[in-house]
Amino acid sequence: MIVRTLNDANQTDRRVISPDGNWESCRLILRDDHMGFSFHITTIYAGKSFRLHYTHHLESVYCIDGLGSIESLDSGEIFSIRPGTVYALDQHDPHILTAETELQLACVFNPPVVGDEVHRADGSYAPDDETVN
């Protein structure tokens, strides 16, 4: 059994802050936990907007707090994000994520991340075989 609190995990290297200042993420469940996914609580700072494209990972996101939007770069559709909204990037969807207010999101990644990943220039995380723990 794995039991962790967000507060405790935020005091460790499980809290990752993006080098570009767009977000921070506390990675509560990671690859080494052997669950087959990783689970993060991610904060997107108010007013930030950036392009993402998880070419090696699938992601599902649930909005806990805040207002924002996600734009599909394939279709051009823009969807509102607010508390209670879930979206799944089930096709490795390239997108633009925008936080109107600070967004607090619960995120699940498959395959799981190691823990210290930050986005590469193309908006992705490195594939598992390029990640060293």
Image: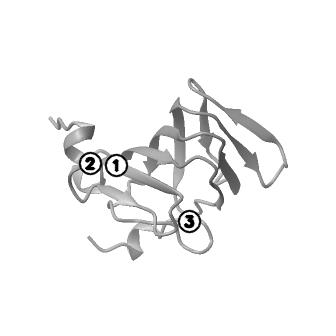
Mark positioned earlier in the residue sequence (1 or 3): 1
- In the depicted structure, whether residue 75 falls above or below residue 103: below
Residue that lies at the very extreme toward the top in this rendered image = 84
- What distance separates the C-alpha of mark 2 from that of mark 3? 23 Å
Q: Position of residue 126 (x, y in %)?
A: 47, 70
- In the depicted structure, whether residue 117 falls above or below residue 103: below
Nearest to the observer: residue 46 or residue 42: 46
Q: Position of residue 130 (x, y in %)?
A: 40, 76
Find numbered disc 2 in the image and state the secondary structure of the residue it sits on: loop
Disc 1 residue crowd, few under 14, some 14–19, many 20+, Cα 10 Å = many
Which residue is found at the position 26% from the left and 48% from the top? 10
Compared across the picture, whether 99 is left or right of 62 comes to right
- Give the amino acid at mark 2: Asn
Q: Position of residue 116 (x, y in %)?
A: 34, 65
Find numbered disc 3 in the image and state the secondary structure of the residue it sits on: loop
- In the depicted structure, whether residue 93 falls above or below residue 131: above
- Which residue is the site of mark 1? 26
Front tag of 1 and 3: 1
Nearest to the observer: residue 24 or residue 54: 24
Find numbered disc 1 in the image and state the secondary structure of the residue it sits on: strand
Q: Are the residues tagged 1 and 2 within 8 Å (C-beta)?
A: yes
